[in-house]
Image (spheres, rainbow, N blue to C red):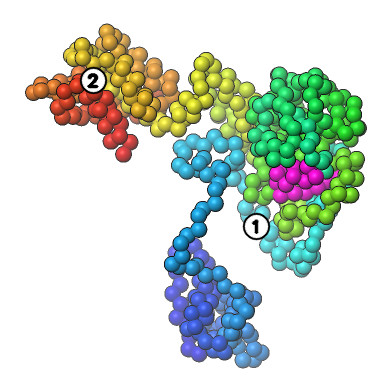
Amino acid sequence: MYDMTIRLRTDSDKCLYQQIYEHIRQEIREGKLLAGERLPSTRSLAEYLQVARSTVDYAYDQLLSEGYIEARPYKGYFVCKLEGIFTLEQETGRVPEPEAWDPQAEDRDEEKRIDFSPYGIDMNGFPFGVWKRITKNILNDSNSELFAQGEAQGDYDLRLTIGRYLHSSRGVNCRPEQIIVGAGNDYLLLLLEKILGRHVGIAMENPTYKRAYRIFRSFAYHIVTVDMDDKGMRADRLEQEPVRVAYVMPSHQYPTGAVMTIGRRAELLRWAEKKPDRYLIEDDYDSEFRYRGKPIPSLQSSDDRGKVIYIGTFSKAIAPAIRVSYMVLPETLLEVYRRDCSFYSCTVSRIDQRILNEFIRDGYFERHLNKMRMRYRAKHDQLLEGLEPFQKKFRISGEDAGLHLLLTAKGNVTEKELLDAAAADKVAFVFMGHGTSHTAKVSYTQMQSQMNALGYKNVFIGTVEGEPEETACENVIEAVKAAGYTKVVLRPLMVVAGDHANNDMAGDDEDSWKSQFEASGEFDSVDCQIAGLGEVADIQQLYVAHTKAAVDSLNG
């Protein structure tokens, strides 16, 4: 056939060979290239398109592998018939299916300026190049066995590598045969329910990891929450409860960040040793990251009676999307697993297992972990420094380890009030008025209350009845600063009553307030805007309407 005209875009995100491949594939699907039709040779098409011959070779190879074309010896490339070729086309004219419910979707509905979600990690330091190279090498080699059914507990080589890593970093004592690899902690807990049995009494720390709590509740387990002190879960309370399993996070408890003392760990082990069917589930949450003090070994490392079920994950240390977790079973429970649960297939792709095994075995994981410890430590220290001004209002705990710390509000403040304050736009609207006119008709305190009732949490009224003008601005600056706002918009209050227009804060007073806010050095920006409203008989409602309209307009 004649040479093929293909519009190649050098500014496209797609490489040239992919553009050639997609163009020819589309021509075949649409019937513009007929079955049996001969394609131009790779040399001819490369010269015509002014690209390297290897670029066309890659495109043709992809079409060959998918069955769109065939190569005939000494004749060239020809279009195949489309019978039997699977295509996934975008359908048009259909009513879209309802979207699946995502329990975390509300947290992602709006783009947040600062996201303190505990689910994310810093991916900027991830060695994408190394991961890509390992993946490419594995897929390029003759590894056809990776596409066969693997071992139920996970590939032995990966379990051997995980066992060595856990022993050197966390002091865990185990054989590869005791390790089960699964796609996330959720799956491992589901599997553990099959091993431990149904209707088990389980103790959990209070407060505890809510996701694990919900999973255990779905098992119809009898859940008992046990209060914590500064040493960890109160082991003495366990004897009083009808439980035979305790779920703990001794290295860096979530959400409090507490580290369980050696003495308390010994108490829990003694409780478990008293009866043969008692066990401790150790969730070694984000234990890889400790910034000060000596590394704290796992609870399992102190267990010489086979009472600890150890669970860990690579979600925090590498990436959540990898979905590789592991569970170390005591020998007694390993026998139960082999008898009752060994028919469950491993839920992690063998390709992902091989990639992870080489990533750890060849030292890339160690280097990545050391780099991320330094990165997270710098962020940890910067966050603590930024929280210093809030120490009068919050108690800080759980620092020096892990990927989170805990702020506990002092005083009588509700969770909803804190969430509302965090969700609000961090721009403070300060409406100025020092009471020189209409003070008999306007209650600034009532106005502040009315604005709060309307949902405008970031509005500050710049005076109260009878407050001296010279102290009004100073008091408002302190209130705005204490509320954590970094930007300020000053709005003089305009009053229009009959034919009389009055600006309570005009001229020099505006400049004075603006100067005082700027001189405080506490705010990123301070702006001053003037606007008025039409005639309103009720001066009190005028002020509320004015303020509401001003905030709406400034919020866009």
The type of residue carrying mark 2 is: Gln
The residue located at (70%, 46%) in the rendering is 184
The residue indicated by pointer 2 is: 540
Residue nearest the observer in this picture, 331 or 155: 331
Is residue 470 depicted above or below 287 in this figure? above
Count neighbours of disc 1 (C-alpha within 10 A) and say few if under 14, some if 14 to 19, many if 20 or more.
few
| Secondary structure of the residue carrying numbered label 2 | helix
The residue located at (75%, 49%) in the rendering is 182
Magenta residue span: 178-194
Displayed quadrant of residue 502: top left
Q: Magenta residues: mostly which secondary structure?
A: helix
Residue nearest the observer in this picture, 409 or 243: 243
Residue nearest the observer in this picture, 128 or 205: 205
The residue located at (21%, 14%) in the rendering is 441
Q: Earlier in the sequence, mark 2 or mark 1?
A: 1
Q: Position of residue 411 (x, y in %)?
A: 52, 15
Can residue 168 be spotted in the picture? no
User: Tag on residue 132?
Assistant: 1
Q: Position of residue 546 (x, y in %)?
A: 24, 28
Numbered label tally: 2
Question: Split into 4 quadrants, where in the image is the C terminus?
Answer: top left
Displayed quadrant of residue 283: top right
